[in-house]
Amino acid sequence: MEEITAFRIDIPQEDLDDLRARLRRTRWARRLPGGWNRGVPVAYLKELAEYWADGFDWRAQEARLNAFPQFTTDIDGQAIHFLHVRSPEPRALPLVITHSWPSSVAEFIDVIGPLTDPRAHGLDPDIAFHVVAPSLPGFAFSPFPEPADERPWSIERVARTWAELMRRLGYERYGAHGNDAGALVTPQLAALDGEHVVGSLITAGLGIPTGDPAQLEGLGEKETAELEELTSWMSGGSGYGPYLAARPQTLAHGFADSPVAQLAYLVERFKEFDGWGSGAEPIDRDLVLTNAALYWLTDTGGSSSWTYYEGAAGLPINQSAVPTGVTHGGPALLRRIAERDNDIVYWGDAQSPSHMVAMAVPDSLVAGIRAFFRMIR
């Protein structure tokens, strides 16, 4: 039951041909009045879909992913796919990194090299990592079994799965990092496996107001106004969360049948988080389409939404079992709030034009990861 099997991505050509055929015969929606505030504009999506059909090279992206050693193993009845890239540096620290929603391990394609082999990237080799990057259950090459397991995939269950994965790999001391959904898993992993986790590093999410009056204690009028503004910004958007929590199967039919429906949904998430369509876009479109292709080719658009329909979506938990760092933490006010319930030893002030930090500013993220774990290793 603890067998670890080598894995290589090899999408059948007929699946790629089917994808192109579906893209080319898309029945396009009529354009509604308004722009991005009505959803993804027809012209924008049509241009992106045409490039996906006739310009995007999946095999090249597949080769980029296959350059990293990949494996699968079964944990708690679930197949777990993961990248496992060992560093040539003798003092490297094992590091499990957890991707975002709606993303995939392709999110880390530009950070794994500098983390594992800093010498080859002109960085100080004294701080390096053996990187383990799992695909979250229900995502890409960690598909749910058929029929799906009826037990909820809570964040705690994922964290226990990651702890078991690191145990199977023989790592008794390791760090953890995550973004978005990964930022939920990472502190939960630290809380559950503090005996082995040396530090919990996330990109953001700590100190954000949750409605708890205690968070406002000791704050001045200006600071309270800043929090209210931030809360207002976070509560805006399309309202996709409540629908995913209530009716995920309905959306899953469209994701499974139409690559354009899947693409539109993913792009809207990126737009809503990141200002997509407003000018210079923060993430290369080949990387956007690599992510979309992984969702489409593995039919995991519906199952990857479990963080909402299982009630796991939200903010990272507070934990003091191990030191905590935040790479793109935002205002110092958020740090003050976060420090009440976390052992904050690092609070980066870096900025990212995208919520998908590893995709948009990989060098910035690498710098934050290296800085935090240099402090605590």
Image: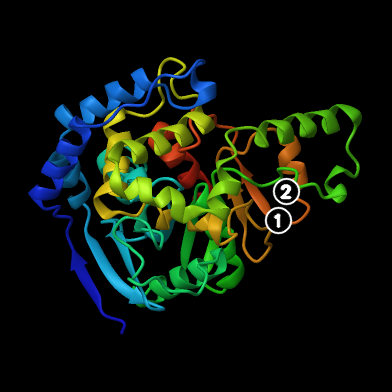
Q: State the image coordinates of residue 63 (x, y, percent, origin top left).
A: 15, 46
Q: Which residue is identified by label 2?
A: 338
What's the CA distance linking mark 1 and mark 2? 6 Å
Residue at x 42%, y 55% (from the top left corner): 304
Q: Nearer the viewer, residue 112 or 80?
A: 80
Q: Nearer the viewer, residue 221 or 308?
A: 308
Q: Which mark is residue 342?
A: 1
Left or right for 216, reference 55: right
Marks 1 and 2 in Cβ contact (< 8 Å): yes
Q: Position of residue 303 (x, y in %)?
A: 41, 58
Please name the residue shown 28% across and 21% down the image.
47
Question: How many dots with numbers?
Answer: 2
Amino acid tagged 2: Ala
Q: Residue at x 22, y 53 (%)?
A: 68
Q: Amino acid at mark 1?
A: Asn
Local packing at callout 2 (Cα closer than 10 Å; few below 14, some 14-19, many 20+) is many
* Left or right: 2 in relation to 189: left
Q: In the displayed orientation, state which residue is furthest to the left.
A: 13
